Image: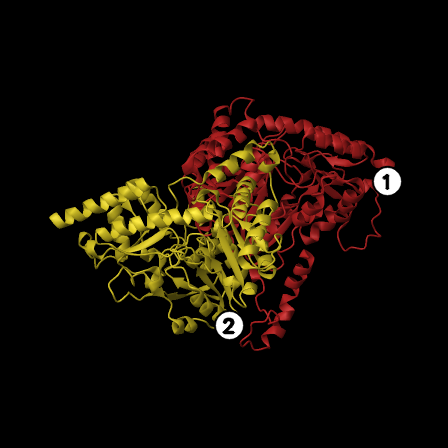
Amino acid sequence: MLRRAGPSLRHFLLERNSSAGHSSYSREAKMSRPVQARRLEGIDKNIWVEFVKLAATYSKVNLGQGFPDFPAPDFLREALTRTLSGGNHMLHQYTRAFGHPPLVKVLAQFFEKLLGRDLDPMTNVMVTVGAYQALFCCFQALVDEGDEVIIIEPFFDCYEPMVKMAGGTPVFVPLRPNPPKDGKLMSSADWQLDPAELASKFSERTKAIVLNSPNNPLGKVFSRGELELIAELCVKHDVLCISDEVYEWLVFDGKQHTRIASLQGMWERTVIIGSAGKTFSATGWKVGWVVGPDRLLQHLRTVHQNSVYHCATIAQEAVAQGFQRELMLYGKPESYFVQLPKELQQKRDWLVQSLDGVGMKPIIPEGTYFLVADISPFKSDVPDDPNSDEPYDSRFAKWMVKNKGLAAIPLSAFYSEAHKNNYTNFIRFCFAKEEATLKAASDILQKWKQEKTSS
Amino acid sequence: MFLASRNFCCRGIQLRTDLLSRSIKHSTSATMPFRHKNTRRIEGLDSNVWVEFTKVAADPSIVNLGQGLPDISPPSYVKEELAKVAAVDRLNQYTRGFGHPSLVKALSQVYEKVCGRKIDPLTDILVTVGAYGSLFSTIQALIEEGDEVIIIEPFYDCYEPMVKMAGAKPVFIPLRCINDGNSASSADWVLDPAELANKFNSKTKAIILNTPHNPIGKVFTLEELQVIADLCIKHDTLCISDEVYEWLVYKGNKHIKIATLPGMWERTVTIGSAGKTYSVTGWKLGWSIGPEHLIKHLQVVHQNTLYTCPTPLQEALAQAFWVDYKRMDHPDCYFYSLSRELESKRDRMAQLLKGAGLKPVIPDGGYFMIVDVSTLNVDLSDVDEKQPYDYKFVKWMIASKKLSAIPLSAFCGLETKKQFERYIRFCFIKKDSTLDAAEVILKNWNKQTG
């Protein structure tokens, strides 16, 4: 992409009277450079800006952007109300910069259980503005110019621009589909890394690998064996692991979410990222965290204290109360971490049926609240356009929201520029939606199919 | 523990050569050489005055006039709006990345009135995580290696590390006291126009302006702003205008937005803060306002750093703004009533300090007051640290007087620290009982000195 300059400031001065005696040399130097910093090169485009707008304008049923349309759990909203009516107005003021003490304390307690190791809430945990900011801190703290970062495709789209903004070079390795021989629907488990291919991506310049399990958009839950493969390579090449585990509780069919940091040699080189938004169905609260060894987190703290410094106190207080409740109910049937995946599994199955029923082939996700479906049977509605640069699935998704009122996200959004055309028949649906929403989606699909068969 | 990790970080460069000389094969042991140090961009940026002093002052027996956080309650309607919002389902999910629609709309209305110009809520505004987040987004968007950024000393401490993290060079210029060091008012502190002009060159990308000023409380006059504006225009320089204390301006003073001066809108990003406007520092909401051709780059940074700010807080803030927008022509508006409340606290604080033999610099704005402590002649030469006098004084004052403040040299570049080490900063946005407790300490000061 050409380094297209924003207009230099000089253009805006042409009509103005400037003071006498200005240095024309200084103006020349300024003029030749764009006003924005080079670190923004190539990272200005963002799929969400476009698709969120389209959904807002056209969609009757929005299964696009990943957020629940059902309410956050009562106990969380009650925690917020309780906090506000508690009369402690100091909760409206700054709290500890690296994390509100009650929150880091309960996170440490929780993750001690999950990881089987002692954690210091002050040094092994830091609170961030959503998992998004946690990712940002990781890249800024740990990735220098010239460092390579391995990203597994398909990936949550922000990894690539964040690596670039840190001056790093993203190195992509794909999950490859191995469809089951018996013609059954694919599972996200059928998308796998090729071990030799993965090993070939590690070089002397490799600083880190970004792991996202459960994976957005496929819903893949990496197995212990797959994680061990990645871990061995990390240890062998002394590479860090940025482990995005925001969907850690959304795992179906009795599967286990294995934390790579608990594998041998991995704790000291892994930063685990989590999200209250995904954990408690409250994406708008923007509370996230990192858990890891102090010798890595100290650098994330430096970035944090020089970028946002504090996170909102009240949100942290309420999330802390939510976790305290879950700590007490851990493993019990009333635990939200038990109930939510159960509910979502039902919704998953429902959507899978709806899609399968109309001929779109869903890939059954093992986790997260996303699934990806093959839209090939519906391709005839959106003819190929050899003149278009845009990946097919993107054109399809746009057509679908405008003409059918159903919003989804093209899978190519989750691929690097070079690989956007590798899988052009898939779109991603979010099923963290009320029954009524999923039913409405099903109705649209049914009607659509009928129109096709009758025409 | 923090100190130890800081040493490790700084010695990392020397250690690195040793580590690289060993070849790394298979290893699972924690004693394996670990080559992962901090990135270059954060080298030397790990220490922070707040981390040091907020810890010390967290002891509840200490009267805390240090960190700038109110211990007064935010206005009740602000708290009520948040409580109302908590009940609305969809406000618990993501909102628009660059700013919740009702909030950017409210901001555009308020600031259109103040600036006298049309402000597009979608393109001219970015909502950020506090003004801190706005400073970061602005600097990351517009500043890079090779650039110089002029910073007026003393300065809110984050400007320097943020400029350095962007790879640029901070160029400092001090405010100088006109009365031969005998300062009674923040207006005594001024920039030397010739000295300022000398700091500008072809590499100067931006100047950071903070008015009303933290820590001195100076409110830059129209003439002073014109001097800065003229230089910005002459050298085609940006202005990052930190105006978080914009409403806290005391009798006889007026807050002027540099962006409203001719030639300045197109080159200025103006930063504001909900925390300072509504006494809700813990909400961490701020905003950047400016021309689209600058704000769009801040938006790119934002979409690649944290994407959205919390929805419920933004909605509550929007509602609070509507309440005050409707009464902006009325003295009851919180923007003005808070200022009146703080003016009397300011006056009380000044009296107490004078009573203890200290020389306060009365601020024209903001909620901080700096004080020359050299008149007390507290001898700290036996304190064996390399720290500047004001750091030692504050630590001594916390330990022996149970009163905390912030040392002014924390707000200066290396070369100017000596100039300001006789001053400490007090925060006076405190409830009456806190000021009463401070009064007791200050009244008894001379009785205990020895």
> Can residue A20 be seen by looking at this rendering?
no
Q: Which mark is residue B437?
A: none
Which residue, given by chain and number where applicable, does mark 1 sit on? B449
Amino acid type, label 2: His
- Give the foreground label among 1 and 2: 2
Q: Are marks 1 and 2 in contact (CB under 8 Å)?
A: no
Q: How many labels, in total?
A: 2
Amino acid type, label 1: Thr
Q: Position of residue A90 (x, y in %)?
A: 61, 36
As measured in the structure, the alpha-carbon distance from the residue carrying label 1 to the one carrying label 2 is 61 Å
Residue at (56, 62) in percent of width and height:
B39
Colouring scheme applied when the structure was drawn? by chain
For the N terminus of chain A, give its image quadrant.
Answer: bottom left
**Residue reaching furthest to the right:** B450
Q: Which mark is residue A237?
A: 2
Q: Secondary structure at mark 2?
A: helix
Q: Colour of chain B?
A: red
Q: Nearer the viewer, residue A364 or B166?
A: A364
The disc numbered 2 marks a residue on which chain?
A: A
